[in-house]
Image (spheres, rainbow, N blue to C red):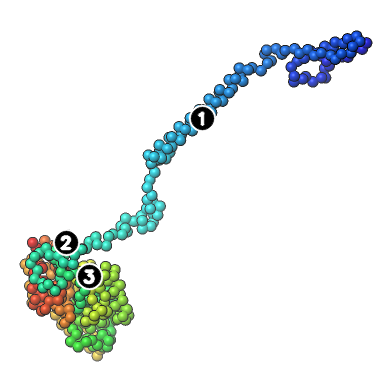
Amino acid sequence: MMFGKSSAGNKNEKKSARPYKNERSVHGSHSGTASQVQTTALPRSQRPSRQKQRRRKPIGHTILLLLLMVFIAAGAFFAIRLLNGTYLGKPVKAFQASEVFTSSLAGKENMKARPFAQKLCVSSKGSVDRIKNASLEEEQKGLLFNLSNHKVLYANGIYDKIYPASITKIMTAMLALKSGKLDDTVTITQENVTLEAGSQVCGFVAGDQVTLDQLLHCLLVYSGNDAASAIAEYVGGTTENFVEMMNSYARQLGCTGTHFTNPHGLQDENHYTTPYDIYLMLNEAMNYKEFTQITQMPSYTVTYTGADGESHSISLEATDHYLTGEATPPKDVTVLGGKTGTTASAGNCLAIITQNAFGKPFVSIVLGASSKELLYQQMNSLLQNINS
């Protein structure tokens, strides 16, 4: 009988991954039955630990739970910071244009827009009387404003449409001053001296050579209409263009009730303004030092080269009777400048800026007086209140 080699003696046989088994062959002598397999248990040190397997599960759960708690805490932290207006410890600042556009207007404090009426006298009513002694007639228009505290002391129809007559020349003078051409020589044209009969003129003729500065003096001291026409044609190129310049400047000043058709104020139904708009123009004119200097002159002598090549001189007296001494303002009232105006439709008109004994300025306007004598009486009824 032959026996096979034992598996334990086979050195080249690979170890099984299964538990160690000791095999024995049992053979019957005649039956030839199959061999039985006997299993031998591994030593305890080589067996897997069930306790370690059981411990791994709770440790993993604990780690996940801790991570979840960390995330929840972090979320709560950031939520609280956001509610407090901070993020990661840094305050959330409001947007500042000047920090971004450092060279833009937003970064320049002195370029900020100011309210239009910040330094103006304003009244929601067309008529106000805080002085109770004005002698203007009911249909006349006028006002008295305190320029230092912007109070309206008296107002009668200040937003009503009126004809300004030669008070128009305030605007003509400002445009001449803005032009920067006062030293230029102007040649008088025929159009400049062709005006309606009876019009106030200096007496120039076509071809005369006069400087713009001289024309400005003739305009404001004597209210010469030929001077106004010459200024308009020279500064504007044409009279029509100059009138457009006048209306444009008026709009810039907020003169919503004003429309000009000429540079001198001769009567035209479409040439009108309001007492309040006259105040706006006169208030602007006082920013030009030449305006106040000229409008305080009682007279002016213009010397120029005539069309014949000869030197000519004309002496002109101021139209403002306060300046000529024909009228006297109340005590401690100083006239700083202004403009007169007279036409049949406008009546006798006067718009002036004065100063009281304490150096405080006032603007006063009287329109539509029936005579020059009455005009100054009515003006004094306003001015007598500026020192009280």
Furthest-top residue in this view: 29
Identity of the residue drawn at 17% across and 78% down: 346
Furthest-left residue in this view: 331
Amino acid type at circle 2 is Lys
Quadrant (top left, top right, bottom left, bottom right) of the C terminus: bottom left
Furthest-bottom residue in this view: 308
Q: Is residue 114 left or right of residue 66?
A: left
**Secondary structure under the numbered disc 3 in the rendered image:** helix
Identity of the residue drawn at 36% across and 58% down: 105
N-terminal of the pair, mark 2 or mark 1, is 1
| Circle on res. 67 | 1
Give 366 or 233, whichever is nearer the viewer: 366
The answer to whether mark 3 and mark 1 are in CB contact below 8 A is no
For the residues labelled 2 and 1, the Cα–Cα distance comes to: 73 Å
Residue 298: give x, y in percent of width and height. 13, 76
- In which quarter of the view is residue 177 placed? bottom left
The answer to whether mark 2 and mark 1 are in CB contact below 8 A is no
For the residues labelled 3 and 1, the Cα–Cα distance comes to: 77 Å
Circle 3 residue: 277
From this viewpoint, is residue 6 visible? no
N-terminal of the pair, mark 3 or mark 2, is 2
The mark total stands at 3
| Circle on res. 151 | 2
Q: Is residue 250 left or right of residue 374?
A: right
**Secondary structure under the numbered disc 1 in the rendered image:** helix
Look at the picture and state if 292 lies above or below 300: above
Q: Nearer the viewer, mark 3 or mark 1?
A: 1
Q: Nearer the viewer, mark 2 or mark 1?
A: 1
Residue 96: give x, y in percent of width and height. 37, 50
Label 3 neighbour load within 10 Å: few <14, some 14-19, many 20+: many
From this viewpoint, is residue 82 visible? yes
